Amino acid sequence: LADGAGEPQKIKTTDERSRFLEVYSQLKSELLADSKIFQFTPESRVWTEKMLDYTVPGGKLNRGISVVDSLRLLLERELTEEEYFLSSSLGWCIEWLQGYFLVEDDIMDASVTRRGQSCWYRLPKVGMIAINDGILLRNHIGQILKRHFKTKPYYTELLDLFNEVEYQTSLGQMLDLITTPEGEVDLSKYIMPTYLKIVQYKTAYYSFYLPVSCALLIFGEKDEAKFEAAEKILVQMGTYFQVQDDFLDCYGDPAFIGKIGTDIEDTKCSWLVVQALQRASEEQKNTIKENYGKKDPANVAVIKKIYKDLNLEKVFEDYEQDSYVSLIAAIEAVDSSPLQAVFKAFLKKIYKRQK
Amino acid sequence: LADGAGEPQKIKTTDERSRFLEVYSQLKSELLADSKIFQFTPESRVWTEKMLDYTVPGGKLNRGISVVDSLRLLLERELTEEEYFLSSSLGWCIEWLQGYFLVEDDIMDASVTRRGQSCWYRLPKVGMIAINDGILLRNHIGQILKRHFKTKPYYTELLDLFNEVEYQTSLGQMLDLITTPEGEVDLSKYIMPTYLKIVQYKTAYYSFYLPVSCALLIFGEKDEAKFEAAEKILVQMGTYFQVQDDFLDCYGDPAFIGKIGTDIEDTKCSWLVVQALQRASEEQKNTIKENYGKKDPANVAVIKKIYKDLNLEKVFEDYEQDSYVSLIAAIEAVDSSPLQAVFKAFLKKIYKRQK
Ligand SMILES: [Mg+2]
Ligand SMILES: [Mg+2]
Ligand SMILES: [Mg+2]
Ligand SMILES: [Mg+2]
Ligand SMILES: [Mg+2]
Ligand SMILES: [Mg+2]
């Protein structure tokens, strides 16, 4: 699962961020005050607090804050204190969900670093306990929802929504894991329909569809068609977003992105290699097979040369333009101008992004 | 997490088991027919089916079937087709939940076998993908509930119940994992209050409280006091059950239990060692420290000798008798004779069990 480098970008004021982080502190305190087990064993309280601080608030927080922004656009006015609290709490539930996915994903991918620090499971005292820590993060969401949303008319829809999105994400993870198993490279599986399914399921649902659906529920939206439009448009937007992520991994400016891409070295089923395999001659295909997934910079250079020969920069440019046109058309067909504004705000944040 | 060796025991007719297993087949087929991802990639369908058959139905099924039995006792009559289907579906949700816990627990404990076969994560093609497979199992429960219970008046309570019980279980796992971390032995942590908390949280809620609560929800029980009584009594019963499990690990007949106990070798925070440490002289304590958690049969024999010297068989006998008396008293104070019958049926299955 991708995180930081490529989330919807936006310059956030320190105020906005720190107000959002205050809600994190409150939700965390409530969780730690709640279970009898923490009162009984202070050790478990200390562990949980450290784990939360390490795994939940350290990302860019774009997914979480976008719930607040979306609700503001839907209401077409500033939020009340309560609306702010509710929308940022759901925003934090999404950040908690992401923390959970990333903790488990890093173990499965044997990753080393995450968000500029060691992966949680790599800390000496943690190890495989991280599996259960991730599960705890998922369970905290149920606790937060029960505490703050139990009396809302949309409580059941909220539980269903988080369940549904978690299921889609874990299906995407499964497809990713069995398509590109570690140590084994079978490039015949790196085809566009599989690529698109993986991306839609493992990224687009929770990163794009979930924040807007949360905002729609608080807003009180009852029309199922609105949620369906959101799903269709935002899954498409999430796909476009991941394609950008894959493109920037190779063509982006590391100083700007904040990390050096290693998708080629890591044998990733990236949009670029899928496009390259579609367009390559038999000879080029063999060259890709021989060089993809190797750590040596010489092998990486061979792959990048093929990308260049196949003019993938132009292929991406066309894809980006087509995506934009098609998204705008889909957005303008939506029968609600505040909802259109929500979609456009998302699109504006990512269109032609450089990081 | 314990499984098989010590679940509530009962001789089940082949008919009862095979009727219950038919519901598994239906629920599985529905899941596999449902997601678009399975239609799209047959590989992922094959993987999921294999994973389900390997991890879900292979236990003794006592937890699952006890939902059906409990509903029958609450209604004081035979079940209709629909009641049978609903109660066994929730029974299967508990088996799915257990499958999920066991898949993750075996990875964290680096276990080798489970239910007489290799642990799922130990299969060559599986490995760490098992983490996500366990997560999928948890997510299947949400799918089953949505499909078959969405229109029921108790749908939200059902979602809350499964969330709550999963949270309790993962808190118990956390406490277990940080109290008895692998490779490190600190017997000063093996004290009765900690032992009781671990057992209550990681076993009693999902094994005893959950099946009865599921039956109460289908029955239409609205009185919160009934659920509270169930929690109090069944958590106590689940604790007694786990103490028996620990006792039988050392004193049970392997031919009868179906496995050879290794709690001493595995440095388990077992009721026996906790009792021994409470009663041991300084000299005996040192002997325990030197010999506990070693694979050599000579070390194990030293521990067993101390258990014998401390007369732990008698300590257990007294504990068993006290538990029985206290449970019967608590049960008879419950203001509902069908609910009393449910509790008594559970107690009857486990009192003085030999396996
Ligand atoms: Mg990863
Ligand atoms: Mg991954
Ligand atoms: Mg990337
Ligand atoms: Mg275990
Ligand atoms: Mg364990
Ligand atoms: Mg045992």
Image (cartoon, coloured by chain):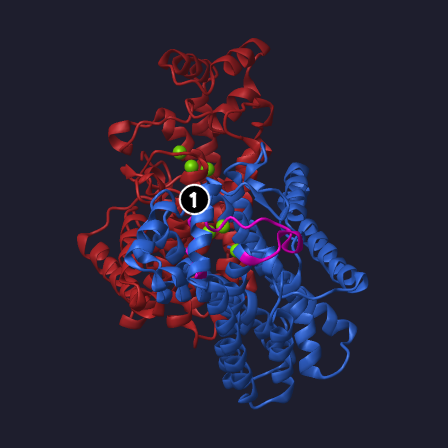
Chain colours: A red, B blue
Determine the residue located farthest toward the front in the rendered image: B309
- The picture places residue A126, in percent across and down from the top left corner, at 34, 45
Task: Measuring from the top left, give residue A212's x and y in whole percent.
Answer: 43, 57
Q: Is residue B267 magenta?
A: yes
| Residue B92 location, quadrant | bottom right
Give the image location of residue A59, x and y in percent: 30, 46
**Residue located 57% across and 32% down the image:** A179
In the figure, B15 relative to B43: above or below? Answer: below
Instruction: Say whether residue B28 is visible.
Output: yes
Q: Residue at x 37, y 30 (%)?
A: A248
Q: Chain of mark 1?
A: B
**Which quarter of the figure is the C terminus of chain B placed in?**
bottom right
Query: Who is closer to the viewer here, B275 or B155?
Result: B275
Vertical position of residue A73 compared to residue B334: above or below = above
Residue B266 seen in the current view: no
State the image coordinates of residue A326 (x, y, percent, origin top left). Answer: 50, 42
Q: Secondary structure at mark 1?
A: helix
Three-letter residue code for mark 1:
Asn
Residue appearing at x 74%, y 71% in the figure: B84
Q: Nearer the viewer, residue B286 or B142?
A: B286
For the record, the magenta segment spans B251-272
Q: Is A152 within the magenta?
A: no
Going by the image, does B65 lie left or right of A318?
Answer: right
Q: How many marks?
A: 1
Compared to residue A13, the image places residue A315 above or below, namely: above
Residue at the outermost left position:
A14
Q: Main secondary structure of the magenta part?
A: loop
Per the image, the residue denoted by label 1 is B299
